[in-house]
Amino acid sequence: MKQSLHLKISRFIRDNGLISSGDNVLVGVSGGMDSITLFHVLLFLRNDLEFTVAIAHFNYRLRGEESDEDARFVENLANKHNVNFFSEKKTLHTTSGSIQEQARELRYSFFSRIAEHNAFTKIATAHTADDNAETFLFNVLRGSGIRGMCGIPIMSKSRKIIRPLLQTSRAEIENYIQEYSLNYRTDSSNAKNTYTRNYLRNELFPGIRTRVNPNVTETLFHASQRFSELENFLRGAYEEMKLRLVKFRNQTESKISVPSLLDYHPSLQDYFFHSFLEEFSHGETSSSHVKALRSLLTSETGSFLHLMDGISIFKDRNLLVFTTKKFQNEFIIPVELEKQYFVGKNVFQCTRVASSEQFTEKPPHVEYIDAGRLHDELVLRSWNAGDTFFPLGFAGKKKLSNFFIDMKVPLYEKKSIPLFTSGDEIVWVCGKRLDDRYKITPQTKQIVKLEYKSLEIN
């Protein structure tokens, strides 16, 4: 066992290019069985593979004095083997989301800072084949896409993280610990099934090994590697699809061609939705999100979904519009002259002006009207189905919905465009078009200036 595990891990490191000659490797050591084995094996291999090692330990203080004892144990281990030791202590906030996710983010952030400031070229973590199997099954059960079924990556190039034990089972580690009589710390929280992963490890996998497949860890490792190969292929296809499908994109909005997307096989449509939504939202996507998006492809224009926090997707004719914009709900605002009114991130105002003011050339957010045509009741309101007006430059009356189509205004934005009305008549579709009945004429005696502009305009 002593020789064979060293040989197995050495071959795994070489085959996957995890460590090169001259590398400085920072080893994440919690004090548990897995990380102690990792450190011990890398100590054994460092001369042969020509690299150096140091230890990093993060203390979350989740178990009070027990956590502090772990930190002292790891520091003593570093001193015993005369390697550099780096540590950090921080208390987690148990009310802020997932404890495990918090711990992961803090741990990797700490590792990255230490590596950057001390010229470490690699960061080694002690994830095992069992960890990979648990991750694989966890992602399958929660409806993850193909990327989730890739399991834990052997190496993360972006953070220079390597996982030399990823093909090593927990049983092999237990045997290694016993044969070398290595001391280690036991995390008492691992025995509690409060966390989903602990339940998988303590309850589900033992049953699978007994009743279904005694080699489930190895089986799921190879399955995750096959999914990784498939993911690499699909990622390339996705990048090519984006070039064809994305018709518009900025920080808050993206538009996808529906006819072009329908040319692809449904499995590629699903992969595109899964990847694009993750990219757009900077968050995780589930199969239920993908299913909902698929339904939009054949939905009527105007259909929409609200997915995740602040992400909406609308069907607008031949486009799917992904947006983070917040749209105005229905509103009715009584208006008086010489006052300002705020609608979302915009401001509306109407003021009397002298007839001598130049108003022939004006920006889109400004309009001048014949004040003598106004009724007593002035209102700023949202669009209603059936609204009509007499758009300047058009012949006769027109439905506002048809005007929006002519102006290529996305249907999902209709409620966001205020209408300035006088009595039952639309005076101005703000920022879009004046009603012909309110235009300035030679007979005009009083003029009102209308403005509707973004608060962000200087």
Image: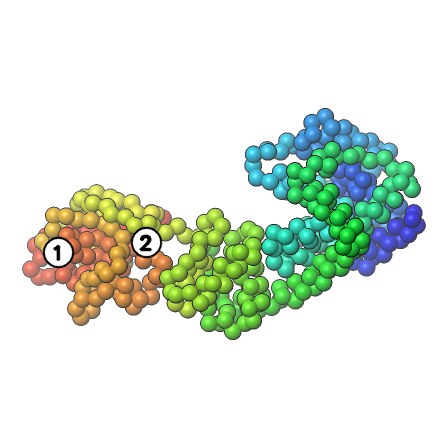
Dividing the picture into quarters, in which one does residue 356 lie?
Answer: bottom left
Q: Residue at x 14, y 61 (%)?
A: 437
Q: Closer to the camera, 12 or 454?
A: 12
- Point out the tag, 2 or 1, that comes first from the N-terminus: 1
Give how far across and how far down residue 285 sits, in percent.
55, 54
Q: Amino acid at mark 2?
A: Ser
Residue sticking out furthest to the bottom: 263
Q: Residue at x 82, y 35 (%)?
A: 184
In the image, taking residue 129 as reference, residue 401 lies left or right, namely left
Q: Closer to the camera, 118 or 328?
A: 328
Q: Closer to the camera, 447 or 59?
A: 59
To which residue does mark 1 refer?
370
Residue 293 seen from this side: yes
Mark 2 surroundings: few (<14), some (14-19) or many (≥20) residues within 10 A: some
Q: Closer to the camera, 198 or 21?
A: 198
Give how far across and how far down residue 283 sits, in percent.
55, 51
Dividing the picture into quarters, in which one does residue 322 lie?
Answer: bottom left
Mark carried by residue 153: none
Q: Residue at x 30, y 47 (%)?
A: 343
CB under 8 Å between discs 2 and 1: no
Residue 121 seen from this side: no
Mark carried by residue 416: 2
Give how far across and how far down residue 260 sits, in percent.
49, 72
Q: Residue at x 83, y 38 (%)?
A: 83
Label 1: which secondary element: strand
